[in-house]
Image (spheres, helix red, strand yellow):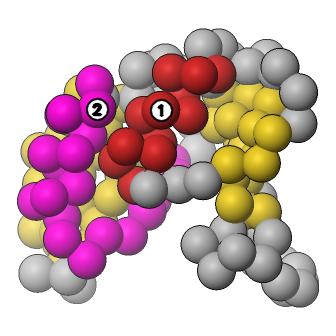
Amino acid sequence: MSPTHHTFDYIEIAAPDLEAGRTFYADVFGWTFVEYGPDYVAISSPSGDGEVGGLDRAGVPGRGGPLVVLYSDDLDATVEAVRTAGGTIVQEPFVFPGGRRFSFTDPAGNELAVWGQP
């Protein structure tokens, strides 16, 4: 996977409890990880040809910063997966031009969003 000029390339998510973060994101989104020691795991690219981000034990979780927005083919199933894995829905699914979206916090308190087609 080659980087593309002026595009998002990598995202790091704060995960003070690294194992809980890894379990949450694996359960909800099926993410797999590359181990880099006790304080960091990289998020593998879905295509398997690199890394797209990481979970960082030293990061400071919270809401109000830049919002990571993911895509889902089945938004309602993703809402349920977030709940089942221990996340909190902070904005129920709503309609916007082009689709539907919801926001959630992970167990560490990081806020992310997911959108899908109507």
Q: Which residues are magenta?
A: 67-86
User: Which of 81 and 96 lies nearest the eye of the viewer?
Assistant: 81
Reading the image, the residue beneath label 2 is 85
Going 44% across and 56% down the picture, which residue do you hit?
Answer: 30
Image height of 89 relative to 118, above or below: above
- Find numbered disc 1 in the image and state the secondary structure of the residue it sits on: helix
Which circle marks residue 23 in the picture?
1
117 drawn magenta: no
Going 28% across and 32% down the picture, which residue do you hit?
Answer: 85
- Find numbered disc 2 in the image and state the secondary structure of the residue it sits on: loop
- Mark 1 Cα within 10 Å, few/some/many (few <14, many 20+)? some
Q: Earlier in the sequence, mark 2 or mark 1?
A: 1
Estimate the x, y position of residue 50 in percent, counting from the top left.
81, 70
Estimate the x, y position of residue 15 in percent, counting from the top left.
62, 23
**Amino acid at circle 1:** Thr
Image height of 69 relative to 63, above or below: below
- Mark 2 Cα within 10 Å, few/some/many (few <14, many 20+)? some
81 drawn magenta: yes
**Amino acid at circle 2:** Ala
